[in-house]
Amino acid sequence: MSPTAAGSYAPPAAVLCGLAGWVPSRVVTNEHLARRLDTDDAWIRTRTGIRRRHVVDPGQSTSDLAVEAGRRALAAGTGRVDAVVVATTTPDHSCPATAPAVAARLGLTGAAAFDISAVCTGFVYGLASAAGLIAAGVAERVLLIGADTYSTIVDPLDRANAIIFGDGAGAVVLRAGHPDEPGAVGHFDLGSDGAHEDLITVAAGGSRQRSRPGEPSRQDRHFAMRGKEVYRHAVTRMAASACAALSRAGWKIDDVDHFVPHQANLRILHSVADDLGLPRARCVTHVESVGNTGAASIPLALADAAARQALRPGDRLLLTAFGGGLTWGSCLLTWPTLPAPARLYDQPPHPYDEPAHPYDQGERTTS
Ligand code: UT7
């Protein structure tokens, strides 16, 4: 417990003490997609800002990426971890959760372990959950991983979505600390609006579809998104959520050195920054290199920015996410002194040049 100005005691805060990202080495460029879809590099870049994305190889799953990112975040010697939380929309299985297997593979058997399902807002929901575990005294240290393999649920023949999404994982370690110290995450804003659940869906695979007779259609087995409506909601909900978190903290927009939004689409990020009155140069972007990586996108953007030394101790950050559900969330933190994150991949990026790969055959489906 931490002493407050009034002499009473506040619960401990969750303080960022480790960070890493990892993406599979296989790269899919816009040119590559244009070879098999009715699209082109210029359309993709002007509509989304994306130039390439990384995808898993056959047999690789979300937990494989989560373990790589988690191991790197823990490598900084952050000490014992009491809880492992994995935010994902693409768990290895619908049952059980992915987090216990990730914990076991990281040598953390015995730690509490559970998944968070809040689509692209999962990482911010995960930060709030980790902060709650620490404040309640349930955990001293939490490993939070955002990991997704959208290439396993997006129809490779669906040009509207295949161009947007990529695979990756980002991980942070949070420890109990003082609410006023650098790295303390706080002043959250979280929300949802399930009346719009149909805007982003994978229709099959859950109890609703399974309770119906018959096999699901190819369309129902894949990710579906009503892009234009999602775009409008994303801009308004992210801006409103960012304002709510800032107001709770008593920060003005000028206090924000870095805005780290969910990396949905460069146009969305810039629109939100414009609506907030924030110079676009303060918007941390990574979407051009990895696409939209779902729950991994904010920690991957942080790891990339930290590796480029774009984040300095004492800088003030605003994190804001939006995703299916609909869900949204924001939180604030002051950047701590951290060990520099490792590179996002071990191997040099590997061109995606194997026509026999299932991603090219349009054969990937959910189980
Ligand atoms: O992480 C969760 C949050 N998700 C998002 O934030 C995604 C939000 N939405 C978006 O980013 C955009 O809506 C998209 C990038 C998905 C699409 O951009 P858009 O400017 O909204 O395009 P559109 O869907 O209105 O399509 C415009 C045209 C259509 O043709 P017609 O009907 O005007 O003849 C589409 O068929 O562009 C066509 N189109 C394409 N053309 C070339 C759609 N996808 C493609 C493509 N290449 N890949």
Image (cartoon, helix red, strand yellow):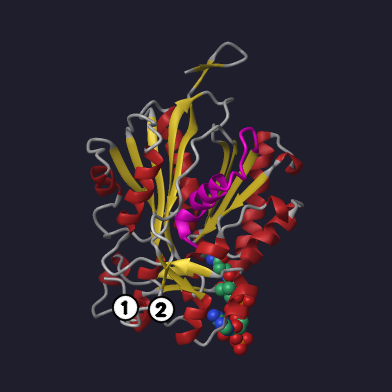
Label 1 – label 2 distance at C-alpha = 9 Å
Three-letter residue code for mark 2 = Pro
Front in this rendered view, residue 270 or 105: 105
Secondary structure under badge 2?
Answer: loop
> Which corner quadrant of the figure contains ligand 1?
bottom right
Mark 2: is the Cβ under 8 angstroms from ligand 1? no
Q: Quadrant of the C terminus?
A: bottom left
Check if residue 309 falls in the magenta segment.
Answer: yes
Residue sitting at 24 percent across and 80 percent down?
214
Q: Position of residue 274 (x, y in %)?
A: 74, 57
Q: Is residue 262 above or below residue 35?
A: above
Residue 193 lies in the magenta stretch:
no
Q: Does residue 112 appear in this view?
A: yes
Measured as percent of width and height from the top left, residue 264 is found at: 56, 62
Horizontal side of residue 69 vs 125, given as left or right: left
Mark 1–mark 2 CB contact (< 8 Å): yes
Which residue is situated farthest in the top direction here?
A: 7
Taking the image as shown, residue 292 lies to the left or right of residue 70, namely right
Disc sitting over residue 156 in the figure: 2
Residue occupying image coordinates x 28% and y 48%: 102
- Magenta region, residue range: 292-315
Where is residue 11 drawn, in percent x and y? 48, 23
Visible residue check, residue 228: no
